[in-house]
Amino acid sequence: MSSVNEIKQHLKAVEQTRQITNAMYLLSTSRMKKAMQHIDFNLLYLKRLRATIKDILSKTKNNNLTNRFIEDNGLGTAVFVVVTSDKGLCGGYNSSVVKLAEEEMAKYQKPMVISLGLAGDKTFREKGVKPEYSWYGASQHPTMNLASQVANKLIELYLTNDYHEVYVVYTEFVSSAVQEPRCVRLLPLLRRDFLDVESEGDKNAQMIFEPSIEVVFDQLVYQYVTGFMYDVFMQSAASENIARMTAMQNATHNADEMLKHLSTELNAARQLQITNEITEISAAAELGGV
């Protein structure tokens, strides 16, 4: 059995660890709630954008609208944007995203990897895959400015014709109890991608585009890609913090169990120490009496 002093030191260390894990749990809870507030608003924005894009596609289908963003030329390879966290201690959150990305990337020859998150960047480099571009802070400090930077780079790469598809791999926030890794094709925007969208305008109304339908559609695409990436940041942030909440909650629970065990062990060690002291005193008294 360990000595009383050793057990006390162990108890102190576990108590300090418990304070840290509990603080991280509370911090992750606050950040998760903040991210969830933005998700609903951004989904409404994306819904309106998608409805507008569908209206244009449906009304111009017979007018032979040709646009670089709605045609899959089948040339080149694909770009994969992988969104992970910048920090650890969030269970299997990062590993599940990277695993899904690797499965999808295996379908293409020499795909480009863009990493959003230190954890994913490190994992890919350890596996011998060097991300072509890296951004950090997407989940810790998601901003529209960062979403715009990433969107501009993705559109720039897509328009080179070296990459005919752009995919985003991230964790979708389904609910506070369910978060699922997803791989979504962002570009090109094919008509079948909008079958689930309800049109908001009058189907029989004639639309006038100024200065031209191509210019209007191009601007919508830029706004859509930026809004989509911002939504990905927010959903990833909420999912990451829920994963960290769960991990820290489990760690705090384990610390509580360990503290109970150590307290029992400390009481037993104290009892043993007192018993030994009484035995020594009794033995000394008997020797003195002799």
Image: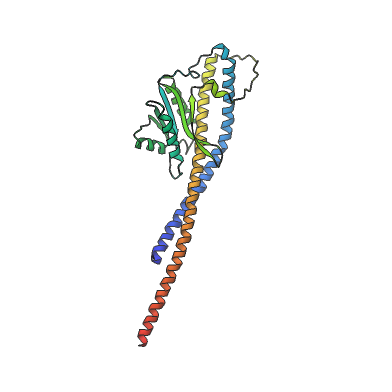
Residue 278 lies, in percent from the top left, at 41, 77
Note whether 246 is above or below 223 in the view shown: below
Residue 7 lies, in percent from the top left, at 41, 63
The residue at 41%/60% (across/down) is 10
The residue at 50%/38% (across/down) is 237
The residue at 47%/19% (across/down) is 72
Note whether 27 is above or below 274 in the view shown: above
Quarter of the image that includes the N terminus: bottom left
Please say whether residue 216 is visible from this viewpoint. yes
Q: Classify residue 6 as left or right of residue 215.
A: left
Image mark count: 0
Note whether 269 is above or below 56 in the view shown: below
Quarter of the image that includes the C terminus: bottom left
Dividing the picture into quarters, in which one does residue 102 lie? top left
Q: Classify residue 33 as left or right of residue 270.
A: right
Q: Classify residue 194 as left or right of residue 122.
A: right
Please say whether residue 156 is visible from this viewpoint. no
Residue 240 lies, in percent from the top left, at 49, 40
